Amino acid sequence: MENLEHLFKNNKEWAESITKEDPDFFTNLSKLQSPEYLWIGCSDSRVPSNQLLNLAPGEVFVHRNIANMVIHSDLNCLSVIQYAVEVLKVKHIIVCGHYGCGGIKASMENSDHGLIDNWLGHIKDVHRLHADELKKISDATDKLHRLCELNVIEQVSNICNTTIVKNAWKNGASLSVHGWIYNIENGILKDIIETPITQA
Ligand code: CO
């Protein structure tokens, strides 16, 4: 059995490099987390939230799943949103998709992917909702890119419609919801909802 020793070595070097800069970093962080941002992104290994935002541990609360979905009945995602909004009192919720998303691509195919097709069905709903616009795009890559963007916009809408976010706004919370997309080919983020949503 491989014991993945190299990962422990990496970890030790990483922890040492941080404590060299700031000897109290981990001690201080162990007492409190107060991130300003909740990141909802894709599980894709090429889209690592902290690294691409250049943020340190403690600065972003993270939920990731295939194709960065916010499903109305997904207790996992809803629990993350509730904790982030009501306990951590984050100021920003960011849904970040990425171009070339494998989950989105698979949802456009009619082949059998097994259990995951039940999850991808939610993206098929987004496709159907925007069928008229997508039908006009003949290039397959352009169509995939646009569906990646439309999916983010729909998930932003789903977040705004949760009881958690609606109640936070009703209670006067300073909370905005953002929709972004990440380009895995150049590492650059783009805002696809020009004005962040601050209330329904
Ligand atoms: Co993806």
Image (cartoon, rainbow, N blue to C red):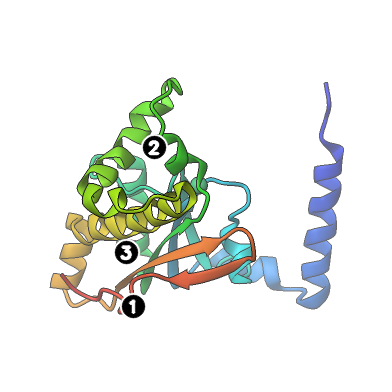
Res. 85 mark: 3
| Residue beneath the point at 80% across and 44% down | 7
**Amino acid type, residue under disc 1 in the picture:** Glu
| Quarter of the image with the C terminus in it | bottom left
**Amino acid type, residue under disc 3 in the picture:** Val
**Amino acid type, residue under disc 2 in the picture:** Met
Which of the two discs, 2 and 3, labels the residue nearer the N terminus?
A: 3
| Residue depth check, mark 1 versus mark 3: number of the one nearer the observer | 1
**Residue 199 placement (x, y as % from top left):** 19, 74
**Residue 77 placement (x, y as % from top left):** 35, 47
Res. 108 mark: 2
| Residue beneath the point at 60% across and 63% down | 50
Provide the residue designation for mark 1. Answer: 194
Whole-Å distance between the Cαs marked 1 and 2?
A: 27 Å
| Residue beneath the point at 82% across and 35% down | 4
- Check mark 2 vs ligand 1: CB closer than 8 Å? yes or no: no
